[in-house]
Image (spheres, helix red, strand yellow):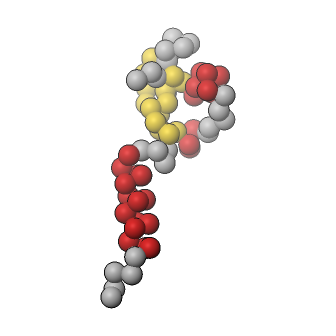
Amino acid sequence: MAEFCLECFHQLNGTHYTKADVIQDFDLCENCGEYKKCVVNLRGHDPMNVLIRFCINLISSTDWRK
């Protein structure tokens, strides 16, 4: 997977995410070539978070007390 720093990620994708919106890790940016924090994933799009949200919504939408 391509790793880009937040600034390069914005330039390439036309986005305006903040540091709180993304998960970052130190890596070599494949655009500017600098070793700094790069975007690994978007928060809220992590497969485990999606699964947890799905389960919470499923439990809250069903009347399991009957």
Q: Position of residue 13 (x, y in %)?
A: 61, 26
Q: Position of residue 46 (x, y in %)?
A: 42, 44
Residue 51 lies, in percent from the top left, at 37, 54
Q: Is residue 32 above or below residue 24?
A: above
Q: Is residue 5 above or below residue 34?
A: below
In the picture, measured across the screen, residue 23 lies left or right of residue 19, that is: left
Q: Is residue 36 visible?
A: no
Q: How many marks?
A: 0
Question: In the image, is residue 29 above or below residue 16?
Answer: above
**Residue 10 on image: x %, y %:** 63, 27
Question: Which residue is located at x 44 percent, y 66 percent?
Answer: 57
Tell me the residue at 45%/17% (across/down): 28
Q: Nearer the viewer, residue 18 or 36?
A: 18
**Quadrant (top left/top right/bottom left/bottom right) for the N terminus:** top left
In this rendered view, identify the residue nearer to me: 59 or 40: 59
Extreme-top residue of the structure: 33
